[in-house]
Every structure is written in structure tokens, then in C-alpha cells.
Amino acid sequence: MNYSTIFNKMTKDAFDKFIEINSLKSLKGVNKDDYKEKFIKYFEENPHVEIDFQNFYKRLEEAGRKHFYLFKLDSEQIKYKNLIDSICNIPSENTRSFDPEQDNQKLYKRVEDNFISVKKIQIRKSYTFLGDEIKNDFLTKKYQISKVHYITFVNFDFKNKRIICGYDSCGDYSDKRKDDKELFEFLETVIGKQVKFESLLTSEHIDTLKYLPNCLAYSISNKANNFDFANFKKSKANFEDIKRDLVQQKYSLKQIKENNPDFDLQTNILYTAGLSKAIDDDFSLTNDNFEFYYFTDVTGKVFYFRMRFDVVESSIITFSESITKEELQDVFKQII
């Protein structure tokens, strides 16, 4: 099986995460080419590990380095039975070959009680910026072009009345407007009609997140009215050091904020002054953009990742390919 498009998409962190979860230190590599070579050889000698890898990748496929949109599910506009009828010809994900070449341009569905998921698999070009080059008085931007595994998906959660959809945000050179258009055309195809989507994310979700003990708030934007706008940031920490302290059990996940106050937004003097001013003068600050580092051990190992919430467009961006759907769900369950 040709894993090249999947391996092109993965980072060293994603390879290392699989190695750490499965205690396979012999697969550690020096660079991505080294990882690819070792993984392919190991799969040939250990088919059961290849199956473990496929299952691991599927957990990354729905979470890592994505641009998500979250909407309220209106059960009057989208009925469970009608949706089932609309996707009846889409094959089950259980029939998926996992061969990227064979799965290219195909749709798959997963149907559970009060939950429906549909994903489209493609092989697309990814452009990674390498730098500028000056030649003969011309400035040229150089990009490395790679073929990568690309996912577009939509989850209909009828129990919690929410729609979570999105697509991969691979590479440095991308056209968000084009990707958004493709996503919403995909949604219309799945639902079978045009639907007006209502935003799910609000400032209250940000307020909940920024106080979580295992969440280091890095950046936040807010406004008092249409004309007042402010953006506050904290310096980034050495998160590997924090992870190392957690692994060595120097303190727990619930003590991250109190042990790393210098890297949390709550210690930003201007930000806290703004909050105090709002309270004293009895007006509200609306948070509309929030970036943070989240620490979790839901996979049995301690990991961290960066996320950005945008309330205006009700979107979430995950920046690392190595986030699993369990870790992402650990964030979602805190707020929605």
C-alpha cells in the first residue's frame, strides 16, 4: 500500500505520538524520510502494527490541523430520517480500503444513534513555503509542492443539536475562500438542500475556556462596542518543559495555570485593567477571538496543542496534525 500522501501530511510530532502511545522507540527517526522508511519496513514485518497505525491515523483524520465550523442543528430544517434517506447511496466507512489512491474522491458515512458523519477523501497538492529567492532582480517565493491526503467532513449530532464540519488546512499557501466554498457545497450535497446555518460558538464559550486550569490563554481579542477593539497576548512558554514537568508528576494537569502564571493571559496587566474598567463602569467586553494551549491526558499520555476560537465566524482552528479526536472532544465537552 502506498502511504506517501498520508506520510506527507504527517509531521514528526505525529509519528512520535504514535511511537509514544504504542511504545515503539525503535521507530524513532532523524527526519521525515527516515520515519517513512522505518514505518514501511516495520509494517511489512508487523502487519498488526500497520492496523494499529491505520486506526491511529483515523483518530487524527477528524481532529488534527483542521478548520472547523460549528453550527446549531435545527431539527426542523434537518431531520434525522430525511438525512438518512439523502445519504443512502454513500458507502459505510467500514468498507473503506484505507488505500489513499483507491479512496480518492470517494465519500463515506458513519451512522450511529442520533449521530451521522460523512467525509470526503481526496488527494490534493499542498504548498509549503521554503523562502524567498532573488535572481536577476526578481524576488521569487519558493514553495515545495507535495501530494497529501485531504479530508472534508460533516458531523450531525442530533443528541446535542450541533453540526461540526470542516476541512484540512494543509500547507502554507491555501485559499480559505475557495476551501469554504467547497465545504458548503459539500454540505448542500449531503443534506440535499440549502440550509441557513446559525452560529454555535459564543463569547461565553471563550469565558469558560480561559479559566480552565489546564488551559494557558495565549491571545484574546475583545470589544466593548463596534468601535472599540483590543487584542491582548502573552509570551509563549517552552511547552515541552511544561509537558516534561507533567510527565515527571511535578504537578498535575489541574495545577498548570498556578505553576505557569507568566504564560497565562490572566496575568496581562492591560487585560486585567480592561476587565476592571468594564466592571467599574458597568459595561461588557465581548470576546470574539481566543487562542490557547490545552493540556490533556485522555489518551493515557500527556500531550498539548494550540487552538484558536473565532466567535464571529463560529470556527475553530487546530494547528497540529497530531491532535486526536479524543483530545479534541476533551475540549468540546468543556463548552458544548
Image: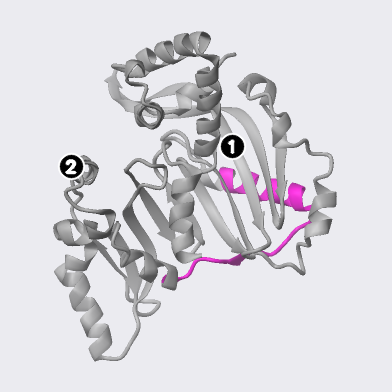
Rendered location of residue 63, percent (x, y): 49, 43
**Which image quadrant for residue 26?**
top left
Total label count? 2
The quadrant of the picture occupied by the N terminus is top right
> In what element is the residue under mark 2?
helix
Q: Is residue 86 above or below residue 213?
A: above
* Residue at x 31% of width, y 67% of height: 211
* Colour option used: one colour
Q: Is residue 118 above or below residue 43?
A: below
Rendered location of residue 113, percent (x, y): 72, 55
- Do we see residue 122 in this rendering? yes
Q: Amino acid at mark 2?
A: Asp
Q: Nearer the observer, disc 1 or disc 2?
A: 2
Distance in Å between CA atoms under marks 1 and 2: 33 Å
Residue 22 disc label: none
> In what element is the residue under mark 1?
strand
**Which image quadrant for residue 288?**
bottom left
- Callout 1: few (<14), some (14-19), or many (20+) C-alpha neighbours within 10 Å? many
Marks 1 and 2 in Cβ contact (< 8 Å)? no
Q: Which residue is mark 1?
A: 151
Residues in magenta, as a range: 179-203
* Residue at x 52% of width, y 38% of height: 59
Q: Is residue 263 above or below residue 50?
A: below
In reply to whether residue 149 is colored magenta, the answer given is no
Q: Amino acid at mark 1?
A: Ile
Q: Residue 189 or 331: which is nearer the viewer?
A: 331
Q: Residue 169 or 103: which is nearer the viewer?
A: 103
Question: Quick one: label 1 or label 2, which is nearer the N terminus?
Answer: 1
In reply to whether residue 185 is colored magenta, the answer given is yes
Residue 241 disc label: 2
Q: In the figure, is residue 203 to the left or right of 260?
A: right
